[in-house]
Amino acid sequence: MKQVLTPEDINNLEEILYKASPAPWRVIDEETVDTVWVSPDIEGNPIALIDYNSAAQNRADARFIASARNYMDVLINEVKTLRKRILDLIQSNNIELQKRLDLQEELNELKKVLQNSDGNK
């Protein structure tokens, strides 16, 4: 499994997200059965039936699936915002560093001029 999402990965996730049924999704479960349904929070048929494990595991998996759908757009936007902020900070830091280097260069030139003027006296 990848440890870092590339911009292409994020674009693919967005495409998957927007092709899926709209959020919010919810879990439909009954305590008396092991089967759990995942459904969009609109009128219509459920999206998924989960019944391959114990009732507790099915409920946990269904809650994960519904939560992933409900918050995926928030997470993608957060990643994009934070990455842009990081790039802005790096650019700002680079500009500040360049200013300092330019000032250091000017200072070195002034020192040379002063040394030359002291040597000419």
Image (tube, helix red, strand yellow):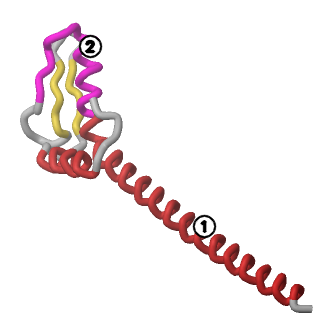
User: Magenta stretch?
Assistant: 48-66
The spot of residue 33 in percent (x, y) is 18, 10
Q: Which residue type carries mark 1?
A: Leu
Q: Residue 55 colored magenta?
A: yes
User: Residue 58 or 98: which is nearer the viewer?
Assistant: 98
Q: Which residue type carries mark 2?
A: Gln
Dominant secondary-structure state across the stretch colored magenta:
helix
Q: For the residues marked 1 and 2, what is the alpha-carbon distance in whole angstroms?
A: 54 Å
On residue 97, the disc is 1
> Helix, strand or loop at disc 2?
helix
Residue that mark 2 sits on = 57
Indicate which disc, 1 or 2, sits on the residue closer to the N terminus. Answer: 2
Q: Is residue 6 left or right of residue 39?
A: right
The single residue placed furthest to the front in the displayed view is: 120
The 10 Å Cα crowd at callout 2, few under 14, some 14 to 19, many 20 or more, is some
Identified at 16% across, 50% down, the residue is 15
Q: Please give the count of numbered marks on the rendered protein.
A: 2
